[in-house]
Amino acid sequence: MGPAPRRPARAAPSVVTAAGRLVLVATPIGNLGDLSTRARETLAAAALLCCEDTRRTRQLLTHAGISGRKLVSLHGHNEVARTQEVLTRLRAGDTVALVTDAGTPAVSDPGARLVSAAIQAGVEVTVVPGPNAALAALVVSGMATDRFCFEGFLPRRGADRRRRMAGLAVDRRTVLLHETAPRLAATLAELADACGSGRKVAVARELTKLHEEVWRGRLGEAAAEFAARPVMGEIVVVLEGAPAPAGADDDEVRLALFDRQRAGDTLRDAASAVSADLGLSRRHVYQLGLSLWNTER
């Protein structure tokens, strides 16, 4: 018997060596004094600045005393094409800073596609944190901050908008929404219809700017208030989470626990999840679960 045939050698996996770095830099949402020292240093040192609007960023750089930086636009209409161009610079070893007109890049603004592509290419991606309108609105709203979700801009119309509204009506977390001034009153009215006019809401407008306003009240009141007066500026709506559901009876609890058990949860995990979902004492749910788990054994 002759020698066994040799297997063809496997090609070594290609490795992208990327000396460059992509830095996401948060910029002021209104008050230019909120530009951090580290943000200023990063913008001054970057070989290339990717901006949502080069004119807005040029104004910021002038205020910060920075000149001679190369700026290119990166926005919703050119992000796909621009990403490849920026990746070429990153692979060549350049440090590229990504900024938006205001706040943290890639949050309801362009940049997420570039970040994903840079990571896939093996490029280091880091961040200079700073201003964020949604979080600023949350902490001044007076709403619960232990659990919250960011919804960005709601769909403008149709079934997607109705589905999102229905979801917000039952979500027990504090909800953060972006909205434009012309659409604010209509959105508040729709939220009042979906969630009930008594749900608490805060409307944060022009945060950190000269005409900053934080209006707090109920959805029904908010819809009437902002329908009756002109509104301008950048707006974040902070919506109170849905109230806990009415207490479930023990049979409902056992059924929920049984579903969790079939899904592979431990008793401890199932009791925590069911008590949170139904708004019940975890101790009570755990005691009901003991008999169920013991029966199955």
Image: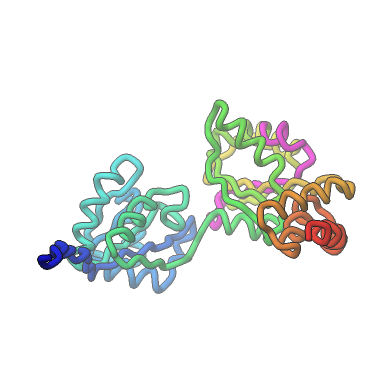
Q: In the image as oriented, which residue stretches furthest toward the front?
A: 1
Q: Residue at x 63, y 34 (%)?
A: 185
Q: Is residue 80 above or below residue 141?
A: above
Q: Is residue 174 above or below residue 190?
A: below
Q: Is residue 68 visible in this depiction of the protein?
A: no
Q: Please state the horizontal and vertical placement of residue 181, each as a whole percent of the image.
A: 55, 38
Residue at the spot 83% in from the left edge and 50% down from the top edge: 253
Query: Which range of residues does the magenta coloring cover?
Result: 190-211
Q: Residue furthest top?
A: 158
Give the quarter of the image for residue 128: bottom left
Residue 127's image quarter? bottom left
- Residue projecting furthest to the left: 2
Q: Is residue 231 left or right of residue 25?
A: right
Indicate left or right for 53 with 102 as reference.
left
Asked if one can make out residue 249 in the rendered structure from this viewpoint, the answer is yes
Residue 129 falls left or right of residue 135: left
Of residue 228 and residue 36, the one placed in the foreground of this image is 36
Check the picture and name the quadrant holding the N terminus: bottom left
Q: Nearer the viewer, residue 76 or 252?
A: 252
Name the quadrant of the C terminus: bottom right
As rendered, which of 148 and 272 lies closer to the eye?
Answer: 272
Q: Quadrant of residue 65?
A: bottom left
Task: Give the colour scheme of this rendering.
Answer: rainbow
Residue 206 position within the rendered picture, expressed as x and y whole percent measured from the top left: 55, 50
Q: Position of residue 119 (x, y in %)?
A: 33, 61
- Is residue 191 found inside the magenta-colored segment of the image? yes
Identify the residue at image location x=65%, y=46%.
203
Q: Residue at x 68, y 32 (%)?
A: 189
Image x and y of residue 120, in percent? 31, 58
Side (left or right) of 182 relative to 195? left
Within the magenta stretch, is there residue 68? Answer: no
